[in-house]
Amino acid sequence: MPLPELLAIVMVLAVCALLFAGYPVALTLGGVSLAFATLAHLIGVLDIGLLYALPQRIFGVMTNTVLLAIPLFIFMGVMLERSSIAEDLLETMGRLFGSLPGGLGISVVLVGVLLAAAKGVVGATVVTIALITLPTMLRHGYDARLAAGTVAATATLAQIMPPATVLVLLGDQLNNSYQAAQLARGNFAPDSVSVSDLFAGALVPGLTLVALYLAFLILVAVVRPAAVPPIRDGAPDEGAWIHLLKALVVPVLLIIVVLGSILIGLATPTEAAAVGAVGAVLLAALRTERAQGAVAVCLGAFATLMILRVVLDLRDGLGFALSLIVMAALALGLLLALRAVHRAGYLMATTTKTTQTTSMIFTILIGATLFSLVFRGLGGDDMVHRALANLRGGTAGAILIVMLAMFLLGFVMDAFEIIFVVVPIVAVPLLQMPGVDPVWLGILMAVNLQTSYMHPPLGPTLFFLRGVAPPEITTQHIYVGIIPFVLIQLVMLVVLWFVPGLATGLPHLLYGSSGSIQ
């Protein structure tokens, strides 16, 4: 084996070892890459001038309009959490279905779908659901293992349910790899795969996974009703249904507007994320005493602006003047809503958490960019391409090996790290192989990452849950309780393998015979 390729392998092993030892991800990626680049330069197998490309790559990351959606989606989810909207949903749904065996568990899954779609970040979803539901489930006699497993599995839906942060990042990386694969095949006008494609592709598999979770809980309620007892007798009264509608309708409407505008092509993910962030502010403002008028002004101004756009030509004098007045009213209402949210204590906490999470993601991305640059400079990408192409079993064998590697890497690496480090290396050779649909490959990777996020012994979800779980729930309860849900996710992977239309059908329906991949 040539010395540069040997160095590339050792560099990967060094990164995995340091991550396993607990060193910070971004610093590990950047530090190991710089060390091996210096070593390779000193022994004459790498030109250190290769690193001159790093500033341009970082600038490309910072100016990527798709990645601008990340802080906006995070802001939307954190605002919904801080303003207790998520808590109201969980408590109301639990009271409504709690009279049924397994009803509280079913409520956790159903509300978890909404939280996953709203938050898009697993850690925040785990903490929110666990703090609210685990004490209640234990107090009413739920089996500790089943309660822990239900919460952990539901929280990881944030990996696959649009508009998940993972899907945004995965879509960006897959688009780069897909274009590189086409250029390598001689197509100098490459097509693209968009984040919208992955959102549409993930919707049906995500809902199918939810249906499998619900079927498992219903089966447990039938076979072992003592493990999932009802929390009270009697049917919910009319007031419970009205309260549910009040707690449910507006957040669901926000999610539908954000996701629907992306899927039908009315807005880009970044534009829809901005709408979601503003919508979350208005929802939080509704919970304060003096901001209902500001929210009404915002909604009224927005509706008026849409009507003016249809009725009048905004380029003429009257239309332009009226639109300016309405936009000023919209801005004023939004400022008043922001002031109310700030006084309620939501805004500062939300912006702080959003800044921390966004900084973490982009710092990892910059470290992964340096790692990828050095790895390719040492010939690692050619080595991976040859290895995958020469595997027995052809395309299917190569994809299986990559899926297994990603699953195992979940023991030591976060989903973001796998997306930034592994996907750019393996996706290009896979997408050069015949018959590999980029959307199908992306959804396979997303479900696989979701599974790796919660499988024992080192799934990050398990540690998030351990940190906030009541003392009655032990680590053993969490590890045993998650097993059936991991098996369900593996079944979902098998189904996706044999029925790729689950991932490709909706993008093809929305965007044409080949999705938005023309």
Image: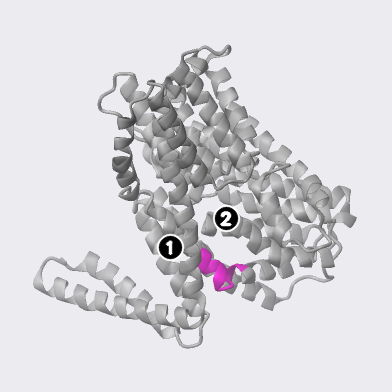
Residue placed most toward the observer, 356 or 34: 34
Image coordinates for residue 156, horizontal then vertical, percent: 62, 49
Q: Is residue 55 magenta?
A: no
Q: Quadrant of residue 105?
A: bottom right
Q: Is residue 513 visible?
A: no
Image coordinates for residue 4, horizontal then vertical, percent: 44, 20
Residue placed most toward the observer, 411 or 148: 411
Q: Residue at x 52, y 12 (%)?
A: 390
Q: Residues within 10 Å of mark 2 (few under 14, many from 20)?
A: many
Quarter placement of the C terminus = top left
Question: Where does the magenta region start and end?
Answer: 78-86
Image coordinates for residue 320, horizontal then vertical, percent: 15, 71
Image coordinates for residue 276, horizontal then vertical, percent: 43, 62
N-terminal-most mark, 2 or 1: 2
| Residue type highlighted by circle 2 | Ala
Give the vertical position of 342 relative to 277 (above or below): below
Dot 2 and dot 1 residues touching (CB under 8 Å): no
Residue placed most toward the observer, 57 or 193: 57
Give the vertical position of 201 relative to 76 (above or below): above
Q: What secondary structure is marked by label 2?
A: helix
The residue where tag 1 is placed is 276
* Label at residue 116: 2
